[in-house]
Image (cartoon, coloured by chain):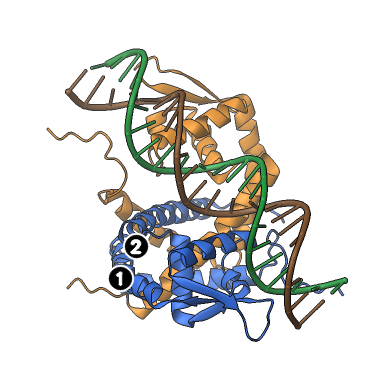
Chain colours: A orange, B blue, C brown, D green
Amino acid sequence: MADDSLAPGELQTYFALMEAVNVLQHAVEQQLRAEGDLSSVQFGLLARLSDAGSLTMTQLADGVVYSRSGLTYQAGLLEKAGLVTRAPSPDDERATLVTITERGAELVGRVLPGHVEVVRRLLFAPLSEDDVRRLGEIMATVRDHMRAQPPRSAAPRKRRTT
Amino acid sequence: MADDSLAPGELQTYFALMEAVNVLQHAVEQQLRAEGDLSSVQFGLLARLSDAGSLTMTQLADGVVYSRSGLTYQAGLLEKAGLVTRAPSPDDERATLVTITERGAELVGRVLPGHVEVVRRLLFAPLSEDDVRRLGEIMATVRDHMRAQPPRSAAPRKRRTT
DNA sequence: TATTGTTATACTCTATAACTATA
DNA sequence: TATAGTTATAGAGTATAACAATA
């Protein structure tokens, strides 16, 4: 069919989604900058390291739509700030193992409550429990679908042309 | 109560939402750049002008979380590209009236189908009609709530301290 | 040869503050 | 005096391409 228009409901849904998320992202950015002097990208990296302890650059790049050099830049900033360390991986000398420091973990802990407060105030406050559940189901579906999509842009990683 | 943690469901919902939207935004950015040499911000401005014909800078700034200078910069780029014109408003000589050109409108028309295709393929493809409807309702609720919130960051516009 | 990551570089974008002009 | 917009400037972030080192 290759219908090239969205149904009216889809259009409204798309616009509402994008506007709401943009506002939320902006508010979050403000809060992270004010309370932790972090960008949301930096916070995202720290948060993932906070869970994992250590990750290689490649692992860290997964799930973030980044160029490798951009990630190197951000990791450099975090290292300079004493929030992470970088060292060659024992398993694979090519790989750089990024590890969160105590100070980094502490910063995440310090910034997280305010972050959560912003998200709750802006995103969840007007929603019922059922709304939240449903929204979660829907967005998980979308996210999984997107993960399964062949990324048309990002440099194909680990692509065996055989 | 000022509970400073999100319910587990809320956290998952938040992460799924942000990841999905980030991927979508990235894909949209690629498409717009490839097919129209536009950023999503520029496309957003053109799209709104496409509906309205003309808007003042202030009107154009509403709904976009921008500094005025950032908007001036973008409007300058669009004007340089021949997609909009700028002229003093007849109503209020202080105001700049931004008007989309024929070429601008044509560009929007040319880029829109691809834009829509990306959104449908990534966002709507895995959703049922009911999902879309519900998502639209939820996000409209959130958006309206956010609009009603006092913007803690953006310079208060038209603020009478009286 | 393929993969991991860094560096050099150029460019886009955004914000702040100072400024001009009109209401 | 307040509002609309622009300009100058500086800083953050991102991508591309060339490069070094390891597998």
Which mark, residue B110?
1
Q: Is residue B112 above or below residue A41?
A: below
Chain label for disc 1: B
Q: Residues within 10 Å of mark 1 (few under 14, many from 20)?
A: few
Chain under label 2? Answer: B
- Residue name at image x 47 percent, y 64 percent: B80
**Residue in the picture at 60% in, 50% down:** A29
Tell me which amino acid carries mark 1: Arg
**Residue A114 can be seen in this image:** no
Q: In the rendered view, does D8 fall on the left or right side of A143?
A: right
Among all residues in the image, which is located at the extreme left?
A162
Say what secondary structure mark 2 lies in.
helix
Please state which amino acid type lies under the numbered disc 2: Gly
Taking the spot 22% from the left edge, 36% from the top edge, the residue there is A159
- Location of mark 2 (residue): B36
In the rendered structure, the answer to whether residue C8 lies left or right of residue B158 reads: left
Mark count: 2
Q: Quadrant of the C terminus of chain B?
A: bottom right
Kindly check if marks 1 and 2 are in contact, taking CB atoms under 8 A apart as contact. yes
